[in-house]
Image (cartoon, helix red, strand yellow):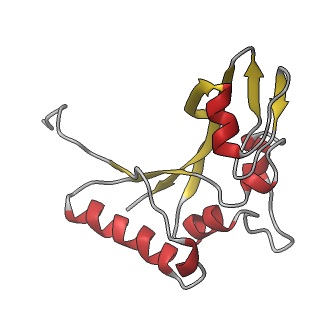
């Protein structure tokens, strides 16, 4: 019988290519390397909580809706998600609340360069979803898309 405490899968925590090096195939190599590490450790599958690379351009639609968008050729709209699919992954689920950042409004104003003069929902550069300002607090829930690589 297998040890129930023995790990069976690997999850990606982060994978990022510096802007100056994007477009050169490094993202593909990152995903392949993660799969190699997982297989080398006898782990399968590999889970990847993906931060879609173009979602910040469309912060108002839900992550579930965004994750379903396709190009005319039937491939996924988002380049980072599309790369995962090209390497054999499938979408497991879209998660609208994967990372919470709550901070005082002055901190949000410093981070975003935007004034938040009233309560409400605001979009900001690089945000994947709106920021909600209530009183003196800003709350942001970043979405992601869980993708599964069967190894």
Residue nearest the viewer, comparing 135 with 29:
135
Hey, which residue is sitting farthest bottom in the picture? 24
Q: Is residue 104 above or below residue 94?
A: above
Split into 4 quadrants, where in the image is the N terminus?
top left
Is 5 placed left or right of 114 in the picture?
left
- x and y percentages locating residue 50 in the rendered image: 55, 52
- x and y percentages locating residue 80 in the rendered image: 61, 65
Res. 83 image quadrant: bottom right
Which residue is at a point 69% across and 17% down the rendered structure image? 136
* Count of labels in the image: 0
Which residue is at a point 40% across and 52% down the rendered structure image? 12
- x and y percentages locating residue 97 in the rendered image: 61, 31
Hey, which residue is sitting farthest top in the picture? 135
Residue nearest the viewer, comparing 61 with 136:
136
Res. 3 image quadrant: top left
Is 109 placed left or right of 90 in the picture?
right
Q: Is residue 6 above or below residue 41?
A: above
Residue nearest the viewer, comparing 26 with 108:
108
Is residue 34 in sight in this rendering? yes
Split into 4 quadrants, where in the image is the C terminus?
bottom left
Which residue is at a point 45% across and 61% down the rendered structure image? 15
Q: Is residue 63 above or below residue 96?
A: below
Residue nearest the viewer, comparing 121 with 42:
121
- x and y percentages locating residue 115 in the rendered image: 80, 36
Which residue is at a point 56% across and 79% down the rendered structure image? 20
Is residue 96 in sight in this rendering? no
């Amino acid at each position: 019988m297998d040890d129930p405490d023995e790990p069976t899968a690997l999850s990606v925590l982060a994978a990022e290519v510096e802007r100056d090096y994007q477009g050169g195939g490094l993202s593909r190599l990152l995903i392949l390397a993660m799969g190699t590490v997982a297989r080398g450790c006898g782990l399968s599958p590999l889970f990847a909580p993906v931060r879609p690379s173009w979602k910040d351009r469309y912060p108002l639609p839900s992550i579930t809706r965004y994750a379903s968008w396709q190009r005319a050729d039937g491939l996924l709209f988002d380049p980072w998600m599309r790369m995962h699919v090209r390497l054999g992954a499938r979408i497991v689920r879209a998660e609208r609340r994967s990372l919470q950042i709550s901070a005082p409004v002055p901190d949000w104003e410093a981070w975003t360069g935007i004034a938040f003069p009233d309560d409400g929902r605001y979009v900001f550069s690089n945000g994947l979803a709106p920021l909600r300002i209530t009183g003196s607090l800003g709350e942001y829930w970043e979405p992601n898309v869980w993708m599964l690589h069967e190894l």
